[in-house]
Image (cartoon, rainbow, N blue to C red):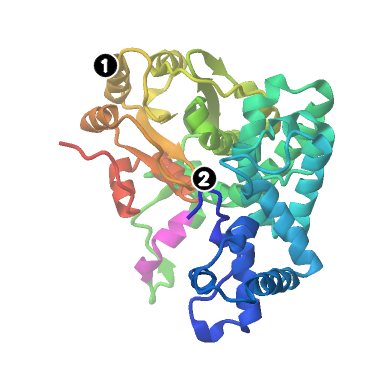
């Protein structure tokens, strides 16, 4: 199979022969999957006929070629040309070249002939295989791109190189994707936070009558209802917890190296949502070899993400040391470190600092990734060391993150929470 063969997932080819259409439809689909070059290669049967010296050889070949042409409608031909521009040719070279009009036309064809998910997949392949970085530098081309999370990560990586006339178009793409993700993720996070915060604020045995929460008290003692007296005996009094400016301090400490791009996007959105919860004091810190506190940008996740510079290099120790300086209520602090744990400095310093946080009763959560893809490559040895001292490291999906935060606010054992959700963590010895 050629390395340039098109992904078969682009087309729905049924496995059951009975469910396939006529032979011409089956030939059409295989023709679109294999592409022009593969379709032009002689089949074993053709080679046998040629070896036997069939006198109508040339006529048959011509007829076959004509028949192949008639397999494709005008739309099929446009679809085929779009695929051939990306997957045709030798090696990883497609047929678009560096011409901006050709790229713009190709992007438009992709959006015309394919559904949004498939168009996004083709777009991602094009960025990897072809010189489409220039599309991120040209407003007309940038507007043709299908907004998705992959594109946002590319914009984050190249935003500092973009000319002024492109930045606004790029910002709009980032805003569209962020708003879609925020709409999807905000409600479950708010629901989880509100429920866990309300439970944490409840207090038993209130000392003063004005501190009694009568509604919760009645609900808690309904089982003690006395029929004859037609009253409830309140064996347990429920009260309002001590009100503070914030119930928990949350610190999101995020590795912004290139491999963590999607995790940065999701963490930025979740941080923005948590910053809107009065009961939480949320701080967001990004790091590579330097540390940047972007807490003031949490109100607008677009500004936050557009200002990120995805780079290489990692100094986890420096980042944790910075966050330590801002922990004033250890028992009420949730520290979330999101990193693949590839430390550029001394790994033992990271372990020591995390141990100090745990000793001070800080709730420490180490996420190897915050994305749907699961954990990428990560430093297994350091993950094991952190697990051994009581900070299990694991990957978390965006869908599970609200429940994880609820567990942390309610001071549940995070290792046990992960096990209940079938999440594999670095095992303890």
User: Where's residue 199, x and y in %?
Assistant: 44, 47
- Horizontally, residue 100 falls left or right of residue 23, namely right
Closer to the N terminus: mark 1 or mark 2?
Answer: 2
Front one among 394 and 114: 114
Mark in the foreground, 1 or 2 = 1
Q: Identify the element where label 2 is drawn.
A: helix
Looking at the image, do the residues carrying marks 1 and 2 touch, with CB atoms under 8 Å apart? no
The residue labelled by disc 1 is: 348
Label 1: how many Cα within 10 Å (few below 14, some 14–19, many 20+)? few
Label 2: how many Cα within 10 Å (few below 14, some 14–19, many 20+)? many
Front one among 373 and 230: 373
Q: CA distance from mark 1 to mark 2?
A: 34 Å
Front one among 121 and 309: 121
Residue at left 78%, top 53%?
109
Q: Residue furthest left?
A: 429
Specify whether residue 178 is in view.
Answer: yes
Q: Which residues are magenta?
A: 216-225
Residue at left 69%, top 35%?
132
- Horizontally, residue 234 falls left or right of residue 190, namely left
Q: Looking at the figure, which quarter contains the C terminus? A: top left
User: Where's residue 407, x and y in %?
Assistant: 39, 45
Q: Quadrant of residue 384?
A: top left
The residue labelled by disc 2 is: 193
């Amino acid at each position: 199979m050629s390395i340039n063969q098109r992904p078969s997932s682009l087309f729905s080819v049924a496995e059951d022969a009975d469910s396939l259409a006529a032979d011409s439809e089956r030939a059409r689909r295989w023709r679109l999957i294999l592409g022009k070059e593969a379709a032009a290669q002689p089949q074993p049967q053709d080679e046998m006929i040629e070896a036997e010296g069939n006198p109508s050889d040339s006529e048959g070949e011509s007829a076959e070629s004509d028949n192949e042409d008639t397999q494709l409608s005008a739309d099929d031909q446009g679809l085929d040309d779009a695929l051939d521009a990306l997957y045709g040719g030798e090696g990883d070279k497609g047929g678009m070249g560096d011409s901006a009009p050709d790229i713009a036309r190709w992007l438009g064809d992709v959006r015309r002939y394919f559904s949004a998910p498939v168009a996004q997949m083709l777009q991602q392949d094009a960025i990897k295989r072809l010189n489409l970085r220039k599309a991120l530098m040209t407003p007309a081309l940038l507007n043709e791109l299908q907004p998705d999370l992959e594109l946002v990560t590319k914009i984050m990586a190249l935003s500092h190189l973009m000319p002024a006339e492109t930045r606004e178009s790029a910002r709009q793409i980032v805003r569209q994707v962020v708003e879609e993700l925020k709409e999807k993720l905000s409600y479950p996070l708010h629901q989880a936070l509100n429920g866990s915060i309300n439970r944490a604020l409840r207090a038993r045995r209130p000392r003063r009558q004005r501190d009694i929460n009568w509604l919760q008290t009645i609900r808690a003692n309904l089982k003690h209802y006395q029929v004859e007296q037609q009253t409830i005996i309140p064996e347990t009094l429920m009260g309002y917890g001590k009100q503070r400016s914030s119930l928990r301090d949350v610190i999101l400490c995020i590795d912004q190296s290139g491999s963590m791009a999607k995790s940065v996007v999701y963490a930025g959105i979740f941080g923005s949502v948590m910053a809107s919860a009065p009961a939480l004091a949320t701080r967001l810190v990004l790091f590579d070899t330097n540390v940047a506190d972007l807490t003031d940008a949490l109100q607008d996740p677009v500004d936050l993400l557009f200002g990120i510079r995805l780079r290489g290099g990692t100094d986890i120790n420096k980042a944790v040391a910075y966050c330590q300086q801002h922990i004033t209520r250890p028992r009420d602090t949730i520290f979330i470190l999101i990193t693949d744990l590839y430390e550029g400095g001394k790994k033992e310093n990271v372990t020591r600092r995390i141990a100090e946080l745990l000793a001070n009763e800080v709730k420490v959560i180490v996420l190897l990734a915050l994305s749907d893809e699961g954990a990428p490559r990560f430093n297994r040895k350091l993950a094991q060391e952190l697990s051994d001292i009581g900070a299990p490291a694991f990957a978390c999906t965006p869908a599970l993150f609200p429940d994880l935060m609820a567990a942390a606010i309610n001071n549940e054992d995070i290792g046990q929470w992960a096990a209940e959700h079938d999440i594999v963590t670095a095992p303890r010895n």
